[in-house]
């Protein structure tokens, strides 16, 4: 994924009224990520979403490599995705997220926009992450200070 630039922000990003985005990342759609019709293959949106979560964690001060050093494994527990329209090769997109905690789970609310349209996301997703250490689910306190 070619990052044009990342846009880390403190507090709410002014993209959608009432949506408290904590982080945004510009992405350039590459031609090989598209199918014969010239639109992004659905599986690539999963890569965009995961890359945004990884960059958010790194921006907040704990990369996935750092987590591994602490023996913390962040595991995708559930993913719900809604495809609303399609990105095409060469499009510039902005992937945004905000996080909430529910017990040991961290819920990432994510939207991908075709830039500069920040009103209508092309894809929306809710990803649930749990943290494990030595095969056991953690209460989440180890990541709460970083992610929230």
Image: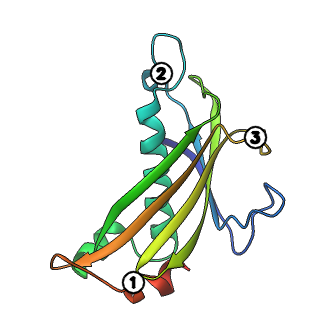
Residue 98: x, y in percent? 61, 66
Numbered circle sitting on residue 27 = none
Q: What percent of the width, then of the height, locates residue 110?
A: 58, 55
At horizontal 33% and vertical 67% (from top left) the residue drawn is: 64
Q: Earlier in the sequence, mark 2 or mark 1?
A: 2
Which quadrant of the figure contains the N terminus?
top left
Residue position marked by numbered label 1 in the rendering? 140
Give me the C-alpha separation between circle 2 and circle 1. 37 Å
CB-based contact (under 8 Å), mark 2 and mark 1 = no
Say which of marks 3 and 2 sits in front. 3
**Crowding near pointer 2: few (<14 within 10 Å), some, many (20+)?**
some
Q: Is residue 145 above or below residue 37?
A: below
Q: Which mark is residue 120?
A: 3
| Extreme-right residue of the structure | 17
Residue pushed farthest top?
36
Q: Crowding at label 3, few (<14), some or many (≥20) Cα neighbours within 10 Å? A: some
Q: Is residue 72 visible?
A: no
Measured from the top left, where is residue 128 in percent x and y? 44, 63
Residue closer to the observer: 77 or 25:
77
Apparent side of residue 55 relative to residue 68 in the rendered image (left or right): right
Q: CA distance from mark 3 to mark 1?
A: 32 Å
Q: Quadrant of the C terminus?
A: bottom right
Q: Horizontal and vertical percent for residue 31?
A: 49, 21
Observer-nearest residue: 25 or 96? 96
Mark 3 or mark 1, earlier in chain: 3
Q: Residue furthest left?
A: 134
Q: Is residue 71 left or right of residue 127?
A: left
Label 2, on which residue? Answer: 34
Side of 138 where 122 appears, left or right? right
Q: Is 39 or 25 nearer to us in this picture? A: 39
């Amino acid at each position: 994924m070619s990052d044009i630039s990342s846009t880390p922000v403190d507090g709410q990003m002014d993209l959608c009224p009432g949506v408290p985005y904590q982080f945004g990342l510009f992405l350039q759609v590459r031609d090989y990520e598209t199918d014969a019709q010239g639109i992004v293959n659905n599986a690539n949106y999963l890569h965009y979403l995961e890359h945004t979560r990884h960059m958010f964690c790194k921006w907040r001060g704990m990369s996935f490599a750092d987590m591994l050093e602490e023996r913390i494994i962040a595991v995708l527990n559930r993913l719900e995705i809604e495809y609303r329209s399609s990105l095409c090769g060469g499009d510039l997109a902005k992937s945004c997220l905000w996080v909430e905690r529910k017990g040991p789970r961290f819920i990432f609310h994510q939207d991908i926009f075709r830039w500069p349209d920040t009103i209508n996301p092309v894809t929306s997703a809710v990803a649930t992450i749990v943290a494990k250490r030595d095969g056991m689910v953690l209460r989440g306190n180890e990541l709460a200070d970083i992610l929230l």
